[in-house]
């Protein structure tokens, strides 16, 4: 009989994330250093466990009109079909068409952080995205509809009691347009996600939130499909300006 335990493997994934976030909280006094370390924990998890078509990084997002988003703590983007990702002086720039999801990652959730995350997400969703028809052997497929960009929040703790309760729900529902947060995780308590059908949020309190969040994110990415065919020449026009 196998000595492996699927339950133990899934528990270990969460335990590793929670432990690393806890160490960050205890070890770093400087808010900036603590924030950077927290982002790195989540980026490492996503890069390790998401399918390889996806990549995660701290980045700005740019569109073909020359507009930039605010700096985003965690961007999940396409690595298989993205024609270019810029890196300059350790800053990463990703074309808007390549983005699947964006997250704000901090140590503790509160109303101000939720509002800040919503502002960050909106700065990405408002960017212009191109989509070209796709040539194939028998002709051309129509341009692919733009996929919805997921937005979310990643923290270790929550200032609210209960951690995922009415106060968080009020903060999340304060912005349901471009800044809407679709999914998130409070690693010490649980995860949440938005249900488009009902317009409400579900809050799941559990023992292994990081693992549950990861599975929920993968499921949502599966339904997102593939990013559109980017109009590279629209970006190339900036070479003459």
Image: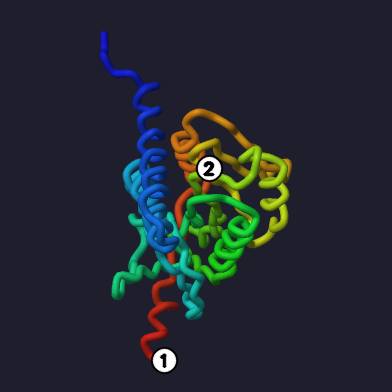
Q: Which mark is residue 241?
A: 1
Q: Quadrant of the N terminus?
A: top left
| Residue 194 relative to residue 190: left or right | right
Task: Provide residue 224's location: percent of width, then percent of height.
Answer: 52, 48
Q: Is residue 76 visible?
A: yes
Q: Is residue 65 above or below residue 43?
A: below
> Callout 1: few (<14), some (14-19), or many (20+) C-alpha neighbours within 10 Å?
few
Which quadrant of the view contains residue 230? bottom left
Reading the image, the residue beneath label 2 is: 186
SS label for mark 2: strand
In front of the other: 77 or 20: 20
Residue at the limit of the structure toward the bottom, as seen here: 241
> Callout 2: few (<14), some (14-19), or many (20+) C-alpha neighbours within 10 Å?
many
Task: Provide residue 29's location: percent of width, then percent of height.
Answer: 40, 57
Task: Provide residue 57's location: percent of width, then percent of height.
Answer: 37, 58
Q: Is residue 204 above or below residue 228?
A: above
Task: Provide residue 35's location: percent of width, then percent of height.
Answer: 43, 58
Q: Is residue 53 visible?
A: no
């Amino acid at each position: 009989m196998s000595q492996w335990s699927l339950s133990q493997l899934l528990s270990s994934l969460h335990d590793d994330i929670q432990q690393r976030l806890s160490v960050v909280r205890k070890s770093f006094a400087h808010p900036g250093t603590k924030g950077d370390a927290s982002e790195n924990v989540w980026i490492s998890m996503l890069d390790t466990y998401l399918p390889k078509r996806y990549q995660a990084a701290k980045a700005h997002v740019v569109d073909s009109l020359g507009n930039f988003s605010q700096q985003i703590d965690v961007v999940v983007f396409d690595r298989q079909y993205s024609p270019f990702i810029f890196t300059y002086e350790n800053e990463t720039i990703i074309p808007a068409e390549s983005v699947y999801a964006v997250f704000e990652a901090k140590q503790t959730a509160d109303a101000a952080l939720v509002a800040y995350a919503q502002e960050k997400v909106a700065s990405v969703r408002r960017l212009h995205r191109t989509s070209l028809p796709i040539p194939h052997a028998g002709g051309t497929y129509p341009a692919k509809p733009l996929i919805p960009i997921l937005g979310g929040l990643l923290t270790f703790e929550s200032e609210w009691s209960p951690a995922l309760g009415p106060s968080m729900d009020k903060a999340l529902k304060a912005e349901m347009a471009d800044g809407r947060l679709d999914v998130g995780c409070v690693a010490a308590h649980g995860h949440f996600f938005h249900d488009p059908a009902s317009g409400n949020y579900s809050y799941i309190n559990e023992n292994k939130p990081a693992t549950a969040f990861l599975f929920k994110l993968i499921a949502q990415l599966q339904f997102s499909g593939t990013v559109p065919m980017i109009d590279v020449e629209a970006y190339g026009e900036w070479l003459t300006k």
